[in-house]
């Protein structure tokens, strides 16, 4: 072919490239405008006004970018890859911010003025680091980077950004409602914000990286004692930052390992168990994100993509910060440290010193906390005993929750396949193929350590923490990465990987991921919690919101010193809510305290059942601690037109009551226990009682109890109840009353 001849397909290819480039840029512009639109909607509709949102955004910008930008300029690190630079800025910033907060808290210096001063200094440090980035910024550089990016990478970038935007819109403004997010992690967060120091707080040795970081928002706002403040609703959306770090790490590893990063990311997100923990407030996704980010940085250093200019101290501090995040996000992160250190320890020789020094600094940062927890776990009498703390003794494993045998392995495997929405037989076939790909990874130098780390940590998980798959998310993600890298090693495998990715996206039953991708193309409206006034925001979490109304401002709830609950409900009962399932449970229990039993195996002595709750989900009983019932006079008459019910009227008696009570707990004791007999409010009294529909009587052997409440009215001179006897002969031994 002559030199100046034109291939007939070239003009078509050029036009196609221009069309695709135009569509891609249009999509990027749409996403940018979408972010601004969502922010404006949130600002306009918050009952507290825009100030909490603006304050939150400022703090988030500082802790996400400022320390990292400042450190990279201070260290004069050259990073040709924008992906690696953004990854380093985010991980360094978040980990450094969490470390500073934790040190202040550990040493009892975590006051609001000091927190504000810290943020001010970090902000100034960030502006120092931002100056070179602003000076070197140009549209031409951005255009050149975009044009240099292969079309497949541009498409994967757009899909990733679209997913992040959809996930953000799904979470922001909604309360965190999953168990440990509300019961544990956010509780430790608000506790940290409400205190100046760790003191003798025994937290079961659970690492506190995320609570330390998130507590800044509550600390500055002063809303740690509030029920579902704006900061809580915004933190739910903030969790998407960790998903972004996860994607950036996969992007970086995908480039270095020559694989389509979207393949393991999509497979991971399509698993219902993994997807559920992406941004729900648990620490498992942040842990997986920092493990992958550390791996990405190590690989980039090994291939020379980061120029340290011989600055060993900078490298030591960088990896110490990354190791600190991995070690202090969750206990199983400690298992990953040896593998990360070994990956860094391998040639060149200079990296070995960096690895050892980084590990040493990490140990100095985390060991004092674990020693603190060990001491107070061994001597619990020295620990704080307040029942309002989320306190537990130190436990290395939770092996009591399961038995690591073949039957358990079969159940775990079946549950994993089921969460992939696959039938068992095809699922087992797919697992067998994945096992072969992992074995192939062991034979490849670039993948051997990944395969070893993933399989070893997965084995440790099975024997120590396999009661929940979330404890193995990092291991599963690493192994998915190994499978993708083994599959796409050859050119034919890359085509097969691309085809598999298309099948996963288009055909797999991943309704959640498809809904997330479609979310930015639908109208955005804030969740109900965002629109409610602060004093009503608990009603966004139903039925817990209904139970709070039943307990908090009612005649039987107002006198209670503690409102005990065996679920995340206790968080909505602040500041009197107490968790009934921790080591400090029922310390300083007071007469009149209320207990909502949802999952307790046994009821503590002294608690008396007074009602069964309805319209609150599963059948739930309400208890009161050490009530003193006084006998009262009861007028008992047969209900007209029926032989199966009688009406009971509580009347004043000189020796007991001076007037008819309008609130209290009535107790009717029968001669003997009898099934089918119930006690309820009379219709006129029930209509005046705003909580009547939520209650039915509690049965305690031969005694029936029922709370009642009605506004004082001349039309209701005395409380009346209907005893339905179910055609049984009934004899009432005693009527008693507990009045508030």
Image: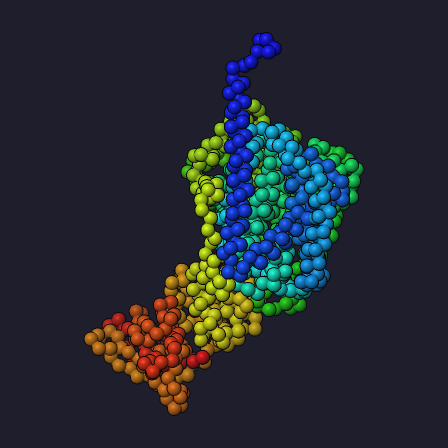
In this view, 30 is above or below 612 = above
- In the foreground, 330 or 122: 122
Q: Residue furthest bottom?
A: 654
Query: In which image quadrant can residue 441 be found?
Result: top right
What's the coloring here? Answer: rainbow
Residue 619: quarter of image: bottom left
Q: Is residue 38 visible?
A: yes
Q: Is residue 160 visible?
A: no
Report the quarter where the C terminus lies. bottom left
Give the image location of residue 353, x and y in percent.
77, 41
Q: Is residue 325 above or below residue 429?
A: below
Tell me the quadrant of the picture where the N terminus can be found.
top right
The one of 74 and 387 positioned closer to us in this rendering: 74
The residue positioned 42% from the left and 80% from the top of the image is 738
| Residue 325 vertical position relative to residue 268 in the rendered view, above or below | below
For the point 54% across and 47% down, which residue is it? 36
Residue 604's spot in the image, x, y percent? 49, 69
Residue 44 sits above or below residue 304 on the image: below
Residue at 38% of width from left, 91% of height from top? 654
């Amino acid at each position: 072919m002559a030199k100046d001849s034109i291939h007939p397909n070239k003009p078509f290819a050029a036009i196609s490239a221009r069309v695709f480039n135009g569509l891609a840029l249009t999509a990027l512009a749409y996403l940018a405008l979408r972010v601004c639109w969502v922010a404006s909607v949130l600002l306009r509709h918050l009952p507290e006004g825009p100030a909490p949102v603006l304050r939150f955004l400022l703090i988030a910008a500082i802790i996400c970018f400022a320390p990292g930008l400042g450190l990279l300029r201070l260290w004069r690190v050259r990073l040709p890859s924008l992906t690696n630079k953004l990854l380093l800025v985010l991980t360094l910033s978040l980990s450094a911010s969490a470390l500073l907060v934790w040190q202040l808290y550990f040493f009892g210096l975590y006051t609001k003025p000091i927190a504000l001063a810290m943020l001010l200094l970090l902000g100034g440090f960030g502006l120092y680091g931002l100056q070179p980035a602003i000076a070197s910024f140009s549209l031409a550089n951005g255009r050149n980077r975009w044009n240099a990016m292969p079309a497949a990478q541009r498409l994967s970038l757009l899909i990733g950004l679209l997913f992040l935007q959809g996930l953000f819109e799904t979470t922001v403004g909604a309360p965190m409602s999953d168990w440990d997010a509300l019961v544990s992690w956010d509780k430790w967060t608000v506790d940290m914000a409400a205190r100046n120091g760790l003191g003798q707080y025994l937290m079961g040795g659970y690492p506190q990286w995320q609570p330390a970081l998130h507590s800044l928002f509550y600390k500055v706002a002063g809303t740690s004692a509030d029920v579902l403040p704006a900061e809580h609703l915004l933190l739910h959306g903030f969790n998407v930052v960790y998903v972004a770090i996860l994607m950036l790490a996969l992007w970086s590893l995908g480039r270095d390992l020559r694989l389509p990063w979207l393949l393991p990311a999509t497979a991971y997100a399509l698993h219902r168990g993994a997807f559920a923990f992406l941004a729900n407030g648990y620490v498992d996704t942040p842990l997986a994100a920092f493990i992958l980010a550390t791996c990405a940085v190590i690989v980039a250093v090994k291939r020379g993509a980061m120029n340290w200019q011989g600055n060993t101290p900078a490298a030591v501090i960088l990896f110490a910060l990354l190791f600190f995040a991995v070690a202090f996000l969750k206990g199983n992160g400690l298992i990953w440290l040896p593998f990360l250190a070994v990956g860094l320890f391998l040639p060149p020789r200079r990296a070995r010193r960096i690895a050892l020094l980084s590990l040493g600094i990490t140990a100095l940062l985390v060991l004092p906390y674990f020693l603190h927890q060990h001491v107070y776990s061994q001597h619990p009498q020295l620990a704080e005993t307040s029942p309002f703390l989320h306190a537990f003794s130190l436990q290395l494993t939770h092996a009591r929750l399961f038995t690591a045998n073949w039957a358990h392995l079969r159940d775990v495997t079946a549950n994993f396949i089921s969460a992939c929405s696959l039938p068992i037989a095809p699922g087992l076939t797919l697992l067998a193929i994945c096992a072969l790909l992992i074995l192939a990874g062991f034979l490849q130098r670039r993948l051997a350590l990944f395969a070893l780390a993933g399989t070893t940590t997965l084995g440790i998980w099975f024997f120590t923490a396999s009661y929940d798959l979330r404890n193995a998310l990092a291991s599963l993600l690493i192994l998915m990465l190994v499978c993708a890298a083994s599959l796409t090693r050859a050119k034919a495998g890359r085509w097969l990987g691309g085809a598999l990715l298309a099948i996963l996206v288009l055909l797999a039953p991943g309704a959640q991921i498809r809904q997330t991708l479609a979310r930015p193309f639908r109208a955005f409206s804030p969740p109900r919690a965002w629109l409610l006034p602060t004093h009503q925001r608990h009603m966004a979490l139903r039925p817990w919101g209904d139970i709070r109304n039943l307990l908090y401002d009612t005649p039987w709830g107002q006198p209670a010193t503690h409102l005990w609950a065996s679920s995340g409900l206790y968080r909505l009962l602040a500041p009197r809510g107490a968790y009934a399932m921790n080591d400090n449970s029922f310390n300083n229990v007071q007469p009149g305290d209320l207990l909502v039993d949802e999952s307790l195996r046994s009821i503590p002595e002294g608690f008396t059942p007074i009602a069964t709750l309805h319209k609150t989900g599963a059948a739930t009983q309400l208890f009161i601690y050490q009530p003193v019932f006084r006998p009262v006079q009861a007028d008992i008459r047969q209900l007209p037109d029926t032989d199966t019910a009688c009406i009971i009227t509580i009347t004043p008696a000189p020796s007991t009551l001076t007037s008819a009570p309008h609130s209290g707990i009535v107790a009717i004791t029968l001669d003997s226990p009898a099934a089918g007999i119930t006690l309820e409010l009379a219709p006129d009294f029930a209509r005046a009682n705003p909580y009547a529909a939520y209650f039915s009587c509690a049965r305690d052997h031969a005694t029936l109890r029922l709370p009642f409440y009605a506004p004082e009215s001349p039309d209701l001179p005395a409380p009346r109840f209907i005893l339905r006897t179910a055609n049984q002969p009934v004899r009432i031994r005693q009527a008693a009353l507990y009045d508030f």
